[in-house]
Structure formats: C-alpha cells, structure tokens
Image: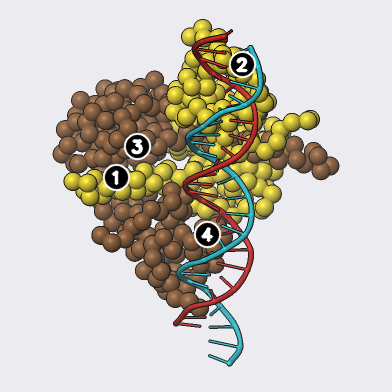
Chain colours: A brown, B yellow, C cyan, D red
Amino acid sequence: MSEGRAIPEATVARLAVYLRVLGGLAGSGLGTISSEALASAAGVNSAKLRKDLSYLGSFGTRGVGYEVEVLQERISTALGVSEHRAVVLVGVGNLGLALAGYGGFRNRGFDIAGLFDSDARRIGQRIAEVLVRPMSDLPAVVRRESVSIGVIATPAEAAQAVCDQLVAAGVTSVLNFAPAVLVVPENVDVRKVDLAVELQILSFHEQRKSAGLKVVL
Amino acid sequence: MSEGRAIPEATVARLAVYLRVLGGLAGSGLGTISSEALASAAGVNSAKLRKDLSYLGSFGTRGVGYEVEVLQERISTALGVSEHRAVVLVGVGNLGLALAGYGGFRNRGFDIAGLFDSDARRIGQRIAEVLVRPMSDLPAVVRRESVSIGVIATPAEAAQAVCDQLVAAGVTSVLNFAPAVLVVPENVDVRKVDLAVELQILSFHEQRKSAGLKVVL
DNA sequence: TAGATTGTTAATCGATTAACAATC
DNA sequence: TAGATTGTTAATCGATTAACAATC
C-alpha cells in the first residue's frame, strides 16, 4: 500500500463526526457539499475541515465542493468502517445495556460478537439479539470471532480482573468505561472514557465562566 | 482573588484522575507520595504530573514528595469539587440510568437536582432517590436549585429540542451524550461525548497496529 | 472572464517531555 | 554531606488557524 500516512488522532475523531453528519444528510438529495456547509453542520471551522480531509487525499472540486458520496466513501475507508470489526462487551449493567442498544455501533462497522457478565441472572438473556454469556466463554468467543477490541462497562472493582481476562483471551485494544486506571502489557491499547471526569471538565469551565462574569459586573 | 491563571484543559482532565487515584489510596495510611509513584498509579509520566501540579502552586517538599491530604485539598479546590454544584439530567433511558446511578457523581461535588423524561411511564419514578419529572417542570427546578449544568442522555432526535429547553431555562453548560451536533448560543458551553466515536478512534488505532504488524512480518 | 471554493503553506498556539538547578 | 525529589526551564512536538494561490 502506498498511502495512509499518520492521521492525527484529533482528526480521526472529527472524521467520525463528519461521517455521521453526512449520513444525516443522506436523504436530502444533496449531491455536493462545500467545506463551509459541512463544517458548520459539524460545528468546526472550514479550515480545520479541509485540513482534516486533506489527510485522505484531495478529491474535492475547486469552486464547487465535495461529492457527498465520494466523501462518505473516503472517510469510511480511512476509518475502516467498511471492514466488519468484532467487539466484545463485558458488563451488562445500565451502561452496558446503553452501549449494547446503541444503534450506532452496528452502523459503524462494529459487530457485538458477545456480551459477558458475571451475574448468573443476566446470563442467557438476549439483548439486541445478542446472548449474554458467562466470562468462561470469553476465550472461545474471542478466538472464534477474531475479536481484537473489548469494551469494559463493569463497576470499578471488577475492571482490572476483566481487563486481564480480555488480554489473556487475545484482545489488543480496550475501551474502558469503568472509573479505574487499568494496567496492561505495552502491546495493548487502552482508551478510557470517564463520565464523571467529563462532567468535571465542564464544571470547571462553568466555574471560570461565572468567575469571569463576576469580574465584568 | 490573586491566583487561578489559566489551567490547560488537558491538565484539568488529569487532575480529576489524580484526585480519584488519591482517593483510592486514602485507606492506605500513606502520608506522603512522590510524583513518580502517583504518576505511575495514574498512568502518566512524572514530568507531566509535576507540570500539572505546578499550575496549582508549589506545595511539595523536595527530596520527599507531596502530602496526600494537601494534594487532595489543592486539587479539590482547583476543580471546584468543594462547591456543591447542581445538575439536571434529561433522558432516563439506559444511559441516563447509568449516569444517575453513577456513585461517582455525588462524591465529586455534583448533585442531581432533577431527572427529566418525556415518557409518562417514567415520570414519578425515583432513581437513586431522585424523582423523575416531566419536562414542564424543568424551568422551575433550574431556577429554584440554581442549576447551571444540564446533561443530555436522550435519543439523537430529541437532543436539540431538549437542549433548547435547557438553555431557555437558564442552563449555561451542556454535557451531550446524544449522537447529535447541538446548536447553542455562544454564551453556552457544550461538551460532547460520543460513545461510538470513542470506539471508532480505538478501532482506527487497532487497524494501524495490525497493518503495522503485517509489514513487520 | 468572474465568482467560488479547494488544497496547502506558514504562522501561531498549546501541550508534552527531558533535563537539571534548587533544596529538602 | 549524600541522596532524593521537586519545580521550572527550554526544546520539541503536534494541532489550529488564517490566508491565499491554484483552479474549477
């Protein structure tokens, strides 16, 4: 392969957003869209959008814009949405249910190959047509479905043990929603999403904003 | 006030993590901790940790480390965890339930002043002792409890309308978990967390990793 | 040709990191 | 004094933005 130089992570995140916005436009019969229009729909400025797209090559038409279909195709390919990617999800509490039910996952090339929980009452249930299995089934499912991504949606206490089992089973990327810092071998990627931390960041800005207002008054 | 210069957003996010790690250490009877030890527990390098803490002043002891209690105090104050901050949460589906039940929220200075949903069957229920109310109660609750932060955990279709109602009620910061780009007045802050995008970013790295391996083999 | 919009360059900004003097 | 560790500097890296030449 001759292309595919490093795409910045911030760009990858935005590409996913552009793709969704384009999806929303799908029914509109719009054949072409300018960087200005797409950027404002995605909530970024047009320079950033063009810079982001430039990592995928140059396939717009000056004076006109981008063909919506070509744009979708390019972004999908770059993100690997076209390739069917199997994930396992461990922890079928409220958050796990929210994730499993999240329609978006399937549309984006993710396939939930298995749901796992340690609670015997959950095991055997079907959620969005996927069976909830005991953790003992994990290695077999990971092997059979060539799963490389695991999602952890357990309580904090269980997270490290679950992570160890995922890694032992052969998973090489972990998305961690539990409020715990995970230790993994260096060939394994962990991405952490902490709902409380997100709220804290927002709150911090809010605090500065109201402090700022006080000064102005 | 004489201090409080700009703390980078990336630093704010990490400070929240340090605070949690310190909380986990609480029972251990450890009086003091070095930047090296805390950094490795938090999964960052020690230079970054010290740089982060330096925004809060200099209160460590060279050759020794930081007093755990002082450290907690400083970080809490900087993040505003000490001040009691009221939030409203709209959308009591699986994700909303997960957020409402998330013990972490209360511990970090957030108080759920109200849960809101449009589904009549949900209204009147209590979740973690908080009553689920109809959207028509929103303005009164926001006013009465001086709420400045709203959390949206509705389906994408409802998100913009809910956001408009939050803003109209007086909310000035919005944490958006719905997979939709929200339009707000410029005095309002929006922070977006997209669970599918997080997975996509991870998947992208995974893709490069396996591509890289192929090249090596 | 005139108008519009891309693709890219260069300037700027912010965040990370290594290194080390200060100091307990 | 010797050893350890902080706090800060300066170098580096990466991401954002404005501006504009290229070109439809």
The residue type indicated by label 4 comes to: Lys
Indicate which label's residue lies in the foreground, 4 or 2.
2
The residue type indicated by label 3 comes to: Asp
Q: Residue B151: horizontal and vertical position, in percent?
A: 56, 39
Q: Are the residues under badges 4 and 2 in a single subunit?
A: no
Q: How many angstroms separate mark 4 from mark 1 (CA)?
A: 26 Å
Q: How many angstroms separate mark 4 from mark 2 (CA)?
A: 44 Å
Q: Tell me, yes or no, if residue B143 can be seen here.
A: no
In the rendered image, which residue does mark 1 sit on?
A: B209
Say few, some or many: other residues with alpha carbon within 10 Å of mark 4 (under 14 / 14 to 19 / 20 or more): some
Q: Chain of mark 2?
A: B
> Going by the image, does A139 lie left or right of B157?
left
The residue type indicated by label 1 comes to: Lys
Relative height, residue B215 to residue A144 (above, below): below
Relative height, residue B60 to residue B5 (above, below): above
Q: Residue A43: horizontal and vertical position, in percent?
A: 55, 56
Give the mark, 3 or 4, whose residue is nearer the N terminus: 4
Locate the N terminus of chain A and report the quarter of the image it occupies: bottom left
In the rendered image, which residue does mark 4 sit on?
A: A48
